[in-house]
Amino acid sequence: MTDDWDERVARFWVEFDDGDPDAALAGMHALVGERPDGDARALYERGSVHDSLGQEQEAIPLYRAALAAGLDEEHEPQAVIQLASSLRNVGDVEEAVALLQTAGLTAWTGDAARAFLALALRDAGRPDEALQVALLALAPTLPRYTRAVRAYADDLTRA
């Protein structure tokens, strides 16, 4: 049942249309209704649909509940990033920064946490740190000038 459910959730996201919020919410509600109450993945998916519809206030408690219920190693880092992004969007940038500073690189999210950390730092009034985070994430992908970009990034926050 889980594999089939996962496939249907994946299909939901492929077909997701934010132009029809009622249908999106109803579709996810039907999928989530197949899981037990308090199921971490179901909470995460509910949060994700609210978040994707610009309903961050509704998404935040669902992400928190999903994380508390214990997500798998694929969805936990995604939930942390999405929670932090939602917090940033509602103005709680300090909590967003704190969450993202503890988020690491994973196979499922790559450097996404650092991208969102850069955005949160900028919104927190820390533009030099934001630029540093972004440059340090970018540096390893450069075919040339990696060392120079790292050095310049390090200089941004030296007092």
Image: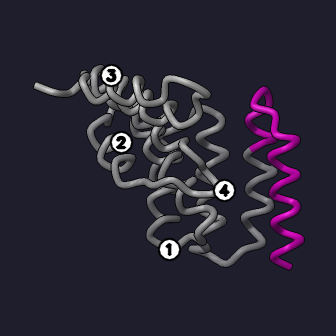
Please report the bounds of the magenta region as a residue range. 1-24
In space, the residues marked 4 and 2 are separated at their CA atoms by: 20 Å
Q: What's under tag 4, amino acid-wise?
A: Glu
In space, the residues marked 2 and 3 are separated at their CA atoms by: 26 Å
Principal SS element in the magenta part? helix
In space, the residues marked 1 and 2 are separated at their CA atoms by: 20 Å
In space, the residues marked 1 and 3 are separated at their CA atoms by: 42 Å
Is 142 covered by the magenta stretch?
A: no
How packed mark 2 is, by other alpha carbons closer than 10 Å (few <14, some 14-19, many 20 or more), is many
Find disc 2 in the rendering and name its residue. Answer: 96
First of labels 1, 2 by sequence position: 1
Find disc 4 in the rendering and name its residue. Answer: 45
Q: What's under tag 1, amino acid-wise?
A: Ala
Dot 4 and dot 2 residues touching (CB under 8 Å): no
Q: What's under tag 3, amino acid-wise?
A: Tyr
Find disc 3 in the rendering and name its residue. Answer: 152
The nearer-to-camera label among 2 and 3 is: 3
* 153, above or below 22, in the image: above
Q: What's under tag 2, amino acid-wise?
A: Ala
Find residue 156 and report its horizontal and vertical position in percent: 25, 22
First of labels 4, 1 by sequence position: 4
First of labels 1, 3 by sequence position: 1
In what quadrant of the picture does the N terminus appear? bottom right
In what quadrant of the picture does the C terminus appear? top left
Dot 4 and dot 1 residues touching (CB under 8 Å): no
The nearer-to-camera label among 4 and 2 is: 2
Q: Does residue 156 appear in this view? A: yes
